[in-house]
Image: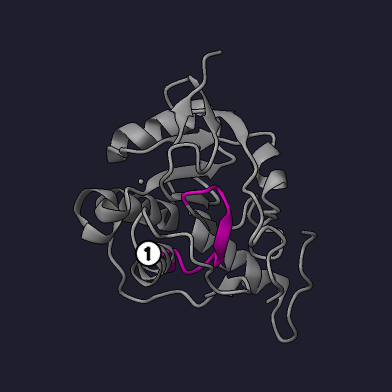
Amino acid sequence: MARHPLIDKPAPTFSLPGADGQTYTVTPGAKGVPTVLFFYPKSGTYGCTKEACQFRDALDKDITFKEAGVEVVGVSPDPVDKQKEFVDKHKLTYPVLSDAKGEARKAYHVGKGLFGLAESARVTFIIDSKGTVRDVLDATLNYSAHVKFVTNWLRKNGSKKDGEAPAASATATAEAPAAGETPAGATPAPATPNAAIPEGQTVAELGRAAEAVQA
């Protein structure tokens, strides 16, 4: 897959409403620690719930996340009330923001998923302690790959004190769904085009895949 246009560039700052109704301004690097920004299709669906809970658990239990002092922020197109329900139900410990107008997705070049059948693709950005985008994983179907992707990057590139080392030069991809997988930021502010359908796949098959991600 082509190199993501934001790799090795400053991560855009943006402001969005969170699940608690407050406006959050996300400024990667402002606190001098790595930021993990993950975009996902829809709160409350099976894959998105698994992914969000995996980030929650990594923040709570994973020594790699703890040593790096990582901040995690989740973003989806869902409205604020849906985000509140999602956060409360699953006791998520990091900001989950509502990008109903697509502003953050546009800033981070995140398109629709599943060849346009999902409003947002599932894309995770690793941003170093200076606010530079270092690596990106675009994998809508493989929800379980994202926490592993971050964990592996942190182990390779070190703690919050020396985590600025460049990562892979190209956007990472992992589209195959993982079988048998089981099931974290931001500070409150004061105030691609769709890909072509691959040969051999039908619209009906892609529709079923979309339902599996967003059911």
Q: Which quarter of the picture shows residue 71? A: top left
- Location of residue 110 in the rendering, given as x and y in whole percent from the top left corner: 67, 54
Crowdedness near tag 1: few (<14), some (14–19) or many (≥20) residues, C-alpha within 10 Å: many
Q: Which residue is outermost to the bottom?
A: 200
Q: Please tell me which residue lies in front, 3 or 97.
A: 3
The amino acid type of the residue labelled 1 equals Leu
Q: Is residue 91 above or below residue 50?
A: above
**What residue lies at 28% left-to-right and 49% top-to-bottom?**
59
In the visual, does 186 lie left or right of 122? left
SS for callout 1: helix
Q: Which residue is mark 1?
A: 154
Q: Is residue 102 magenta?
A: no
- Horizontal and vertical percent position of residue 70: 36, 49
> 174 or 50, which lies in front?
174
Between residues 212 and 14, which one lies in front from this camera angle?
14
Q: Position of residue 49 (x, y in %)?
A: 38, 51
Left or right of 170? Residue 194 is: right
What is the quadrant of the N terminus in the image? Answer: bottom right
For the view shown, which residue lies furthest in the front direction? 161
Residue 198's image quarter? bottom right
Q: Position of residue 3 (x, y in %)?
A: 69, 71
Magenta includes 132? yes
Q: Magenta region: which residues?
A: 129-145
Is residue 25 shown above or below 166?
Answer: above
67 left or right of 194 in image? left
Name the residue at 28% across, 65% down.
Answer: 182
Name the residue: 62% across, 70% down. 171
